Every structure is written in C-alpha cells, then in structure tokens.
Image (cartoon, rainbow, N blue to C red):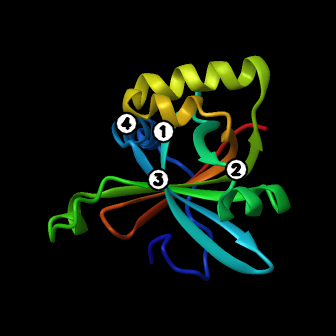
Amino acid sequence: MNGSSACFPPPRDAPGDRELLRRLLESERFAVLATGREGQPYANLVAFAPGESLATLLFLTPRATRKYENLRRDPRVALLVADSRNRAADLAAAAAATGIGEARELSGTAREEALTRFLARHPELEEFARAPTCAAFAVGIRRYILVRRFQEVMEIALEP
C-alpha cells in the first residue's frame, strides 16, 4: 500500500524529493491558498513567490478581503502548488505540493525585501503590490505534502 491512504502517514522524503519540490515552486506562479473561519475552509488563487529557502512562501492580498480577515483571525494556512495542465497525461506526470504553516503580515524592511522578490517574479503586479491597501505575507512552512504520479505521497518536514 502506498502513502496515499488516510490510515497511514505519508512516507518521509526520499533523495530527489526536495529537488522536485524546489523545481515545482520555482516553475509555478500561482497557488491555492486555504484559510479557515469558524471551522469552514476557504480557498483562493494567489500569485506567490518562493522565499530564499523552502521554508518561506510569499503572497500579497488587499486588506479588504475575506482571506485577509481570515488570516487576521487564524494565521494557519495551506498553500497548494501544482503543475497540472488539465490533461489526461497529468495522472502520470503532474506533481503537487501542499505547504502547511502560518502566515504573518510583513512590514518595514521585511515587506520591502518580500516585494522585491515577489515583483521579480510578477513584474506585471507592481501597481497592485505597491498600493497602500495591499498586504504582503510570508508563510512559514513547517512541512510539505508532495504528490507525484497521482498516488505517490511524500512528506517533507522542515527544520523549525
């Protein structure tokens, strides 16, 4: 039985899994952000950028949004990054990673550094990113669940 069963924890990462994860985070530009409120999950598509290490993912959101309010109430999040292209071949070829961690709003120098990294990846979002109503978040990732070939599930735990 593989690691995809809910009865068994996913196997720990094997050689090459971190490189696959790194390539996935570097190649994809969008992620699905999952937040929660009063026990109800809420998901949004967000533009993201990886931080300097696998342990950080960056995204922006206007402050006048449901996701921003959810983050203020509960910073626990999951971010799903996938390279699926909606083709039958994705069953054998696609990979997806869910980063699980906590989001914190950035300010000052940390915000400017995050914006520099984010805008290097998404220059078309400069006006949005620089708006005073836009918040920058860093997600401190504790672990990733990496899935490839539809059923191969690995867990990559990061150092605290």
Q: Earlier in the sequence, mark 1 or mark 4?
A: 1
Q: Are marks 1 and 3 in contact (CB under 8 Å)?
A: no
Which quarter of the figure has residue 20?
top left
Residue that carries the numbered disc 2 in the rendered image: 63
Residue 123 percent across, percent down from the top left = 39, 26
Residue that carries the numbered disc 1 in the rendered image: 18
Q: Quadrant of the N terminus?
A: bottom left
The residue that appears at 41% across and 57% down in the rendered structure is: 96
The residue that appears at 52% across and 80% down in the rendered structure is: 5
Three-letter code, disc 4 = Arg
Three-letter code, disc 3 = Ala
The residue that appears at 53% across and 48% down in the rendered structure is: 13
Query: As rendered, which of 13 and 94 lies closer to the eye?
Result: 94
Which quarter of the figure has residue 88?
bottom left
Asked if residue 52 shows in the view, the reply is no
Mark 1–mark 4 distance (CA, rounded to whole Å)? 9 Å
Select label 3 or label 4 by which is in front.
3
In the rendered structure, the answer to whether residue 134 lies left or right of residue 14 reads: right
**Residue 23: assigned label:** 4
Residue 109 percent across, percent down from the top left = 75, 17
Asked if residue 49 shows in the view, the reply is yes
Helix, strand or loop status at disc 2: loop
Q: Earlier in the sequence, mark 2 or mark 4?
A: 4
Crowding at dot 4, Cα within 10 Å, few <14 / some 14-19 / many 20+, comes out as: few
Q: How many marks?
A: 4
In the rendered structure, the answer to whether residue 17 lies left or right of residue 53 reads: left
Q: Are marks 1 and 4 in contact (CB under 8 Å)?
A: no
Mark 2–mark 3 distance (CA, rounded to whole Å)? 19 Å
Mark 1–mark 2 distance (CA, rounded to whole Å)? 33 Å
